[in-house]
Image (cartoon, rainbow, N blue to C red):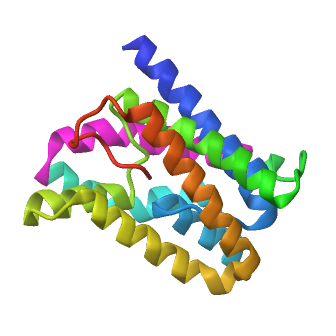
Amino acid sequence: MFKRFIILVIGSILIGIGINLYFVPYHFLDGGMIGIGLIFHYWFGFKPGLTIILLSIPLYVIAFFKDRNLFYNSIHGLWLSSFMIDFFIQWYDFYNLPPLFSALVGGTLVGVGIGLMLRSDSATGGTDLLAQLISKGFGLNAGKLIFAIDSMVLLVGWPIIGMESFLYSLFAISTIGFFTTVLTHHKGSDGYSFR
């Protein structure tokens, strides 16, 4: 249990650093609820971690009644990762790499962080939780639903961040997906979702 908690903390720290030191300076996006939190941050100045928690509350209420295991396995990941995202927001201008390297390094850190969380049977929750609930309720493929939701988040964010940041965001998300896949390749198809 202690080892799992340490892995969750390390994964959450990597996510917080990757988002704030490498995504935020160039207005890059991620998919899922983290991406939605970033859109609210870029557009309105809201704290992304707090936004993620607030927007996830209805999904967690549904999960509590529909799938308690899913609820318990995701809730601590949501709280830890959201806390770390807001904790490291003050460091967004600490050290800026060129955009391409920032997308690569940030995507690597976020991907490894999420991968570690998934290996410890946790997740950052959010829209992936929604995809899992829809998948179980209607027999649809959770991976395809996650891809569709992530794509919608990027398309909504496109006018806010502009074309250049949008293209770098696609590269960053591909990097996240690569490292998440590498770290979770041992899990079955019922493993937790990406973001």
Does residue 69 appear in the picture of this structure?
Answer: yes
Farthest residue in the bottom direction? 159
Position of 113 relative to 159 (above/below): above
Q: Is residue 188 left or right of residue 67?
A: right
Instruction: Considering the whole magenta stretch, tell me its main secondary structure.
Output: helix
Q: Which residues are magenta?
A: 66-89
Position of 3 relative to 123 (above/below): above
Residue drawn at (51%, 19%) of the image: 6
Which quadrant of the rendered structure holds the N terminus?
A: top left
Residue in front for this viewpoint, 191 or 167 = 167
Q: Whole-percent x and y of residue 32?
A: 45, 62
Residue in front for this viewpoint, 41 or 137 = 137
Q: Whole-percent x and y of residue 38?
A: 62, 65
Q: Whole-percent x and y of residue 63?
A: 21, 53
Position of 86 relative to 113 (above/below): below
Does residue 130 appear in the picture of this structure?
Answer: no
Q: Whole-percent x and y of residue 43?
A: 68, 78
The quadrant holding residue 151 is: bottom left
Q: Is residue 46 left or right of residue 50?
A: right
Q: Is residue 22 left or right of residue 141?
A: right
Q: Is residue 156 left or right of residue 70?
A: right
Magenta-span inclusion, residue 67: yes
Residue drawn at (29%, 32%) of the image: 187
Position of 63 relative to 123 (above/below): below
Magenta-span inclusion, residue 88: yes
